[in-house]
Image (cartoon, rainbow, N blue to C red):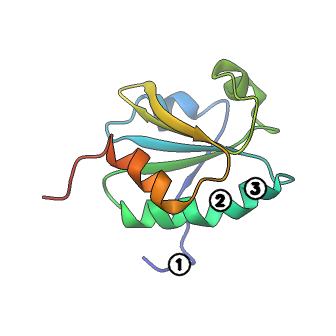
């Protein structure tokens, strides 16, 4: 996979349950909006992280302006908010543009180690 390939699924109010809650692998959800400068900064970091965990985690990016129902359901009040869902529930997360190492530590708590 090269850096120009899309490594994420675009989440929506209508596909969130299927793409996130009903998934067998942990799902990293990036709650963001295009006008949010910290979101634009952390976006490539999150996509790079998804490449690092190919096959072990799924990345879903959800624009909160276009999908307010899901943002309201999970009480998203600040963006970027990054949350890891596993077994249909949010299990860990971080608010704000966190560095890659912090995001990696968060994901490592949920993702199975490489065999």
Q: Secondary structure at mark 1?
A: loop
Mark 1: few/some/many CA within 10 Å (<14, 14-19, 20+): few
Between the C-alphas of marks 2 and 3, the distance is 6 Å
Between the C-alphas of marks 3 and 1, the distance is 21 Å
Between the C-alphas of marks 1 and 2, the distance is 15 Å
Relative horizontal placement of residue 20, taking residue 43 as reference (left or right):
left
Q: Secondary structure at mark 3?
A: helix
Instruction: Estimate the x, y position of residue 38 in percent, counting from the top left.
Output: 75, 55
Q: From the viewer's perspective, is the residue at label 3 or at label 1 nearer?
A: 3
Which residue is at a point 60% across and 53% down the rendered structure image? 98
Q: Kindly indicate the quadrant of the structure image that contains residue 11.
A: top right
Mark 2: few/some/many CA within 10 Å (<14, 14-19, 20+): many
**Label 2 belongs to which residue?**
42
Q: Is residue 79 above or below residue 9?
A: above
Question: Along the line of sight, which residue is nearer the eye, 84 or 105?
Answer: 105
Q: Is residue 75 above or below residue 2?
A: above
Mark 3: few/some/many CA within 10 Å (<14, 14-19, 20+): some
Relative horizontal placement of residue 87, taking residue 64 as reference (left or right):
left
Q: Is residue 3 above or below residue 70?
A: below
From the image, which quarter does the N terminus lie in? Answer: bottom left
Relative horizontal placement of residue 113, taking residue 32 as reference (left or right):
left
Mark 3 or 1, nearer chain start: 1
Instruction: Estimate the x, y position of residue 44 in percent, counting from the top left.
Output: 62, 66
Which residue is at a point 31% across and 57% down the rendered structure image? 55
Mark 1 or 2, nearer chain start: 1
The circle on residue 3 is 1
Q: How many marks?
A: 3
**Label 3 belongs to which residue?**
38
From the image, which quarter does the C terminus lie in? Answer: bottom left
């Amino acid at each position: 996979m090269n850096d120009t390939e899309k490594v994420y699924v675009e989440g929506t109010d209508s596909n969130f349950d299927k793409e996130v809650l009903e998934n067998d692998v942990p799902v990293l959800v990036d709650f963001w909006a295009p006008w949010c400068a910290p979101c634009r900064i952390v976006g490539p970091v999150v996509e790079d992280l998804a490449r690092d965990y190919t096959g072990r985690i799924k990345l879903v990016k959800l624009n909160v302006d276009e999908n307010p129902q899901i943002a309201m359901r999970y009480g998203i009040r600040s963006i970027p908010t990054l949350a890891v869902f596993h077994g249909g529930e949010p299990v860990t997360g971080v608010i704000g543009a966190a560095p890659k190492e912090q995001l990696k530590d968060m994901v490592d708590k949920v993702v199975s180690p490489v065999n």
